[in-house]
Amino acid sequence: MAEDDTVVLFIGDSVTDCGRRDDADRNLGNGYVRLIDEAFAAGGTPVTIVNRGVSGNRVRDLKARWQKDALDVAPVLVSVLIGVNDTWRRYSENDPTSAEDFEADYRAILSALPSRDEVALVLVEPFLLPVTEAKKAWRVDLEPKIAVVHALAEEFGAVLVPADSYLNGLDDDPAEIAADGVHPTEYGHELLAKLWLDTIEAASA
């Protein structure tokens, strides 16, 4: 990450989007991606952060826009956070995504990337905080998808950011991290950004 044109891409759903399309400044949104960008700038790391999160996306949606929003950006690092909507739709619209379909589409987008020698890869666990009994019940659908992310991270030589296990392991009231269990509060985004940066730093050591 030493060149002025070095692009770091964040792609995923609303957690990554976080209002980026209303951000006339740099299209970064007001969540963890902006905080990471600020941390890179403060540390003197000359990178260009690109946010391609889209609220409501499932992994199939990433697959449909992967060429334009990922490959054409020509990043040197891609960070993917996807999966909670693949669970959410099962309960909100009776439109489930099986773990097998989730894995197939996720593998397809990762397979389209260049090798790890050319593009570093970061996979972030989709996460869910137990703010209600109903949300606790969603774990049965989400946990197999988290297992898929773990397996793909190993298969594709990616750095794994353990967002679900980390956020659920804190002593904080879960609603202080994500009021609805899914969308981080300002504090939740701070936690997520710090975890991402700490995980990358540890992997690079």
Image (tube, rainbow, N blue to C red):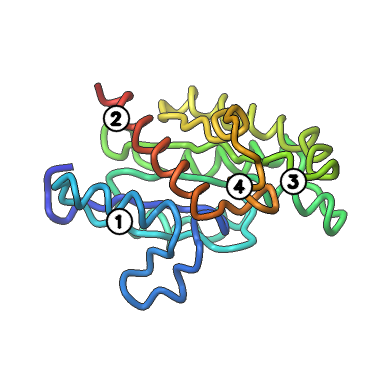
Residue 201: assigned label: 2
Give the Cα separation between the discs numbered 4 and 3. Answer: 22 Å
N-term mark: 2 or 3 = 3
Q: Nearer the viewer, mark 2 or mark 4?
A: 4
- Coordinates of residue 202 in the picture (x, y in percent): 32, 24
Asked if marks 1 and 4 touch (Cβ < 8 Å), the reply is no
N-term mark: 1 or 4 = 1
- Coordinates of residue 104 in the picture (x, y in percent): 64, 39
Q: Secondary structure at mark 2?
A: helix
Residue at image mark 1: 49
Q: Residues within 10 Å of mark 1 (few under 14, many from 20)?
A: many
Task: Name which residue type carries label 3.
Answer: Thr
Q: Residues within 10 Å of mark 2 (few under 14, many from 20)?
A: few
Q: Secondary structure at mark 3?
A: helix
Give the Cα separation between the discs numbered 1 and 2. Answer: 17 Å
Q: Secondary structure at mark 4?
A: helix
Give the Cα separation between the discs numbered 1 and 3. Answer: 28 Å
Q: Secondary structure at mark 1?
A: strand
Q: Quadrant of residue 93?
A: bottom right
Give the Cα separation between the discs numbered 2 and 4. Answer: 26 Å
